[in-house]
Image (spheres, grey):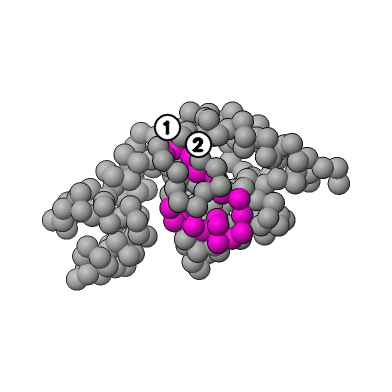
Amino acid sequence: MNTSAGYVLFDVDGTLIDALDNQRRVWAAWAARHHLDPAEVYRVALRTRPSETFAAVAPALDPAQCLAEFHALEDEDVRSGMYSAFDGAAPLLRGLPAGSWALVTSNYEHRVRGRFSRTGLPLPEVIVDAAGVSEGKPSPVPYLLAAERLGAAPGNCLVVEDAPSGVEAGLRAGMTVWGVNTPLPVEGVHRHFASLREAAPSILAYATAQSIVN
C-alpha cells in the first residue's frame, strides 16, 4: 500500500527519456516517403498530435494510413534506435516510494516499456498512454486518470513536464506543475529546473517528506 501523501506524475519523452533526435528522425523518414519538407513537418509536429500534423501538412492523404506508417516507423525506432535517459532519471525513479508515481505519455505503453528496457529505467505500476484516454494533452484527462488509478487527489499530485501541452494539462487538472529540461520556464509552471538532475532532490522531497502513516 502506498503511504505517501505526495504523488508524482511524469511525462516521458523530453522529461525522463531523451528522444528528441529519435522523434526528429521518425518524422523525417515519414516526410521523405511523401516528398514533404522534413523541417516543416517537424515544426508542425512539435506543437500538435500526429493526426493533427497529418491534416496540416498532408490534407490529401489518408490519415489512417499516415498514422499506420508513422506507428511502424516509431516501433522500428524503439527496436533499433539509440536512446538515453536524462541524467539523474534512474536514481530518482528508484528512490520514489512504491505506488507514489506514474507515467503519463502521449505515446503508447509498448513503446514506453521498450524505451525503459533499453535505458534501464524502472517502471511504475501505473502508465497512462494514448490508447487509454479519449482526449490527449493539453486536456487534463490523462493526468486526472493517472491520479484516479493511484488513488490520489489532484491537489496531492506533482506533474513533471517539459512541454507546453503537458504543462497546460497538469494545470487544468488542478495539480502542481514543475518544468524540467528547458532553458527557460514554460508558461504556467510553479517551479522551473534547467535539468531533471537539478529537480530530482526536490521531486524526491515532495514524494517522501509528506509520508504519512495509514
Q: Quadrant of residue 90?
A: top right
Task: Give the side of residue 34 with respect to residue 20, left or right.
Answer: left
> Is label 1 or label 2 in front?
2
Q: Indicate whether 64 appears above or below 38.
A: below
Q: Indicate whether 197 appears above or below 56.
A: above
Q: Position of residue 42 (x, y in %)?
A: 26, 51
Q: Position of residue 104 (x, y in %)?
A: 54, 52
Q: Which residues are magenta?
A: 164-182
Q: Decide if residue 73 is in sight here.
A: yes
Q: Decide if residue 72 is in sight here.
A: no
Residue at image point 31% right, 50% down: 73
> In the current view of this chain or complex, which residue is farthest to the right?
214
Residue at image point 33% right, 45% down: 23
> Does residue 18 belong to the magenta stretch?
no
Q: Are marks 1 and 2 in contact (CB under 8 Å)?
A: no
Q: Indicate whether 124 appears above or below 148.
A: above
Q: Position of residue 204 (x, y in %)?
A: 65, 35
Residue at image point 40% right, 37% down: 183
Residue type at the position of mark 1: Ser
- Determine the secondary structure under disc 1: strand
Residue 84 disc label: 1
**Mark 1 / mark 2, whichever is N-terminal:** 1
Residue 193 disc label: 2
Residue type at the position of mark 2: Phe
Task: Give the side of residue 91 with respect to residue 19, left or right.
Answer: right
Residues packed near mark 1 inside 10 Å, few (<14), some (14 to 19) or many (20 plus): some
- Determine the secondary structure under disc 2: loop
> What is the tally of numbered marks visible in this picture?
2
